[in-house]
Image: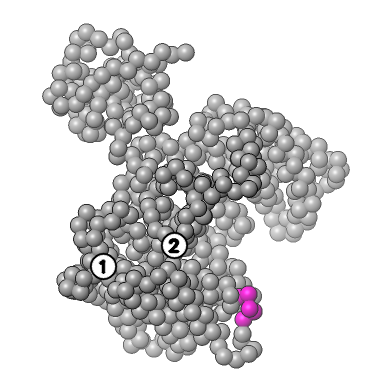
Amino acid sequence: MIAFFSGLIATLTAIAVGAGVRRLAPVFGAVVPPRPDRWHSAPTPTMGGIAIAAATMVGFGVGLAGPLLESDIVEWSAVLAAGLAMFVVGLFDDRLQLSPVAKLVASLAVGAFLVFALAGIEPDGALPSSYTLLGTIWFAGLCHSFNLLDNMDGLAAGVALIATAFMAALIGPSLGAGLFILLIALVGALAGFLYWNRPRARLFMGDCGSLFIGALLGGVSLVPVFHARIAFVSPMVLTVLILVVPLFDTAFVLVLRRLAGRSATRGGTDHVSHRLVSLGFSERSVLRVLFALGLIGGLTAWLLLRWTTVEPMLIVAVFAILVILTGIYLARVPAYNAEDFKALQKSSFAPFLKDLAFKWHVGEVLLDLVLITVCYYAAFRLRFEGDELLAFLPYFTASLPVILGVKLAALYTSGLYRRSWETFGFRDLAAVARGVGMGSLLTVAVAYYLYRGQGSSRVVLVLDGLLLALAIFATRASFRTMNLVASARNRRHRRVLVYGAGGYGRLLVREMRANSSWKMNPVGFIDDDPMKAHRWIVGVPVRGSIDELELTMSRYSVDEVILSSPAINGRVEHRIKEVCARLQRPVRRLDMKIT
């Protein structure tokens, strides 16, 4: 009950203080003019972090009234002091424009003092030096991750709200009542601030807000390390999953800026959010995508704690592959005026990298190494349990190097690496089946040659083959799926209704989907054949017959009607043009030969 009131009071306080900051910010010149890396078209008040920090403190103060904070006073007071210190740094930056180096030094210094406070002054309580270094860097990195993430209305606050809620639910109860209440108060403050910061934002949080949020979450995430000093990795894995969006965005930007030969501290429109907008997503759609990624990360962390029937490593591996594929896809979106990999092209080993990347598809090969390992291990996990699994795992470990070799060779021989990810589909199943089938046969031969059949299982081999085939097809087809989603959501593409769902119409729709230069998004077919009504053809629905043409065009905001076949003429063509004329929409014919 105390936690509920703490969050509620924090929400109301953030709304009230936010209103005050909006009125006072212009008086002190705390206004952000329109900028290329933002989407606001009018000057907007900033320093909304004052509302976030004040609301968090007020909400946490409500918790102080309860008999619950004495046991972990060192932890919550240290984390809160670190958060307030970074809030002050952010205030100075908002008003005086500190250099990136100054902010970095400040965050590292605050992180070092936080680690010292959490470890205590007693020599017996000191952490290993590697833990101290990692903890300090982690704190500073998370502060700047949220600072970088604050590049779109509602993005940083929304992602922080999701992450804080998951952290409170999954890690909070083990941290002590004080830190749990602090997290709940931050959730409430972020919810209240989003009232002002949701698109179109009427108030920005500023660096004082983003650094305060990053400091609190960074500090709280370090506390489990001091509660269970031998389990540094385990709580960190949970935290990385919960905070996947800011960490992914920061790593993505830093790596690609380095490959483009740009300074890591130089801002620009190269974040994950910017690239999604470049693909045609609206601001609200970008928020939905990144919020969904944050939710998936939090739910994955929840599964690690609750779902004990599956090895946690497999869950993390699947999620990591999803994030990596998303990063690879977004890295292809131009952001540096065609100089995205300028530094890589100028390096002394550029010819070697180019040869590998474009002739041998080194990225695909490395991904398949991971997929083969994960699927082979998953097959053992699904087949065996308990002591039986322990008896078979040594065979898995011993045979894995050879299995990797023979399966990679089989996949290469099958012609899989000559297939394009952009057009990968069911027509490529034969190559997948050949590669996986040949690899499974070679695996059987290796097992019987090396171990005379001991340590192997027919069920494991079948499961391994099925899992690997599914994983290869899913990863290869992911780019085509992403292209289709991006094309469907692209606001700059014309929404096209295709009249005629025959061979010509199917061919046209496939070309619209595959060729982004056409700038067409097929939203449906119109066809007078009753057998095709309300069916899906090449992934596009048949919306009805010519009688539903006007209603369909209005309902789905159609920009243009395409006549797909030369057979569409005479009275039918005249009627279509009459409907389009009434709605002031163009109609034209695109004839394509079917070969």
Q: Quadrant of the N terminus?
A: bottom left
Does 128 lie within the magenta span?
Answer: yes
Q: Is residue 1 above or below residue 425?
A: below
Picture coordinates of residue 352, whole percent (x, y): 65, 42
Q: Is residue 234 above or below residue 199?
A: below
Picture coordinates of residue 237, whole percent (x, y): 56, 64
Secondary structure mainly formed by the magenta segment:
helix
Given residues 330 and 526, the one toward you in this image is: 330
Q: Earlier in the sequence, mark 1 or mark 2?
A: 1
Residue at screen point 29% across, 78% down? 54
User: What residue sits right under mark 2 in the picture?
Assistant: 265
Q: Which stretch did the figure color magenta?
A: 127-131
Q: Are marks 1 and 2 in contact (CB under 8 Å)?
A: no
Furthest-bottom residue in this view: 122
**Amino acid type at image mark 1:** Thr
Residue 232 can be seen, yes or no: yes
Does 282 lie within the magenta span?
Answer: no
Between the C-alphas of marks 1 and 2, the distance is 21 Å
Picture coordinates of residue 98, whole percent (x, y): 37, 72
- Determine which quarter of the picture holds residue 31: bottom left
Q: Is residue 314 left or right of residue 11?
A: right
Residue at screen point 34% across, 42% down? 280
Q: What colour scheme has been applied to the protein in the rendered image?
A: one colour
Residue 228 can be seen, yes or no: no
Label tally: 2
Label 2 residue SS: loop
Residue at screen point 50% across, 40% down? 478
**Amino acid type at image mark 2:** Thr
Q: Which mark is residue 46?
A: 1
